Image: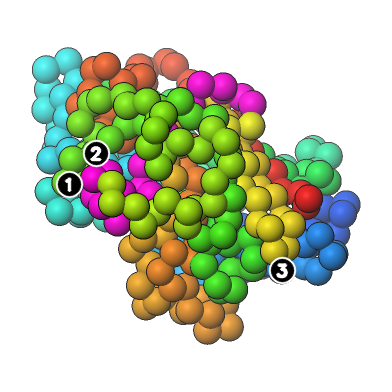
Amino acid sequence: MVTTDLFGIHEGKEVFLCTLTNKAGNVIKLTSYGARITWIEIPDKYGTKDNITFGYDTFEETREGDKYFGSVVGRYANRIAGGKFSIDGIEYNTPKNNGPNTLHGGPEGWHSVVWETEIMESSKAPSVKFSYVSPDREMGFPGTVKVSVTYTWTDDNEIIMDYSYSADKKTVVNVTNHAYFNLHGAGKGDILDHEVTMKAPSFTPVDPEMIPTGEIRPVSGTPFDFRTPHTIGERIGMNDEQLGLGKGYDHNFVLDNREEVAVTVFDPVTGRVLEVITDQPGMQLYTGNFLDGSQKGYGGTVYKFRTGLCLESGHYPDSPNNPDFPSTIIKPGETVRTRTIYKFSVR
Ligand code: BGC
């Protein structure tokens, strides 16, 4: 079942809040502002339900609060070095909103626009499609891009995210979802005890500006080796150059098993499990190293340092400037479809 409420008005446009309830009686909420996931309420191993993602009670707080909680990020998720890149010899400049770099599509990227809302009545499970037309040169990027994301909340507690985009000029696109997860329940302590397994044989090390150096480095023998389960906290404090640069984990992992489970996160306290399945080549693991307690979400809950983690499936950061990385170029006439699934269960 899907119910829709008016959440607020942004720049004269109505912003909706959609509540999706599956047959198991579990609820997620989505808003058309930034095509965000704002609420994921699922049981723990004792059957006790809790919301495990970050968000705010009101639209005004959502808009004024952290830019990326639960949002779709685009046109280019993660960083573009120096706020510039070239396509066919033409240089494009994008706003520098993260030191010298462009982060997450620029200050007014897709996280901050109102998407069209469509309830997918024909879907068996509750499903909502958000669409947006991004004009030519929006945040400096070439070409008009038509993008949509369809969220389906299955009876097996999976959030299926189906993205689709096309452009009328050659351009670059990299979309992701920026939900923060705390499997204890959002606001209930940190995520250092969350146990992560990630089928990533290598990662892309960064320079001091958090831009990939171009190297694809094997994880073997490093604190980035999650091929067997490790808690986030186990090695995050190690004296390691890359952990120092990211202030913790804030790195793109190179996946080798597309369309299977790329990452499993297990909370030993509640037994909650999150699996991420994706067809994308990369996965940014970000452990909330820049959360500083300044954001107060639901019921005044303070989101402190490392109390949430993000698993951002997508292309590698700064691919437009790295010809050796999988290409993010999209040509006119092409439609790219990608799928990422967040699947919740208990153990
Ligand atoms: C980036 C972090 C950044 C955060 C902002 C993540 O995707 O990797 O470096 O601080 O987004 O919310």
Answer yes or no: disc 2 within 8 Å of ligand 1.
no
- The answer to whether residue 233 shows anywhere in this view is yes
Q: Which residue shows up at 85% across the image and 64% down it? A: 47
**Residue 156 in the image, given as x and y percentages of width and height:** 81, 44
Q: Which residue shows up at 69% across the image and 50% down it? A: 273
**Residue 94 in the image, given as x and y percentages of width and height:** 18, 42
C-alpha distance separating marks 1 and 3: 37 Å
The amino acid on which the numbered mark 2 sits, given as a three-letter code, is Val
Question: CB atoms at circles 1 and 3 under 8 Å apart?
Answer: no
Q: Secondary structure at mark 1?
A: loop
Question: CB atoms at circles 2 and 1 under 8 Å apart?
Answer: yes
**Residue 142 in the image, given as x and y percentages of width and height:** 24, 31
Few, some or many residues within 10 Å of mark 2 (<14, 14–19, 20+): many
The amino acid on which the numbered mark 3 sits, given as a three-letter code, is Asp
Which is in the foreground here, disc 2 or disc 3? Answer: 2
Comparing 314 with 251, the one in front is: 251
Q: Along the horizontal axis of the image, is 277 left or right of 85? A: right
Residue with the mark numbered 1: 209
The image quadrant of residue 219 is: top left
Residue with the mark numbered 2: 206
Q: Which residue shows up at 44% across the image and 73% down it? A: 304
Q: Which residues are magenta?
A: 241-260
Q: Is residue 80 above or below residue 286?
A: above
Residue with the mark numbered 3: 50
Q: Secondary structure at mark 3?
A: strand
The amino acid on which the numbered mark 1 sits, given as a three-letter code, is Glu
C-alpha distance separating marks 2 and 3: 36 Å
Answer yes or no: disc 1 within 8 Å of ligand 1.
no
Question: CB atoms at circles 2 and 3 under 8 Å apart?
Answer: no
Q: Along the horizontal axis of the image, is 138 left or right of 191? A: left
Comparing 198 with 37, the one in front is: 198
- Is 151 within the magenta? no
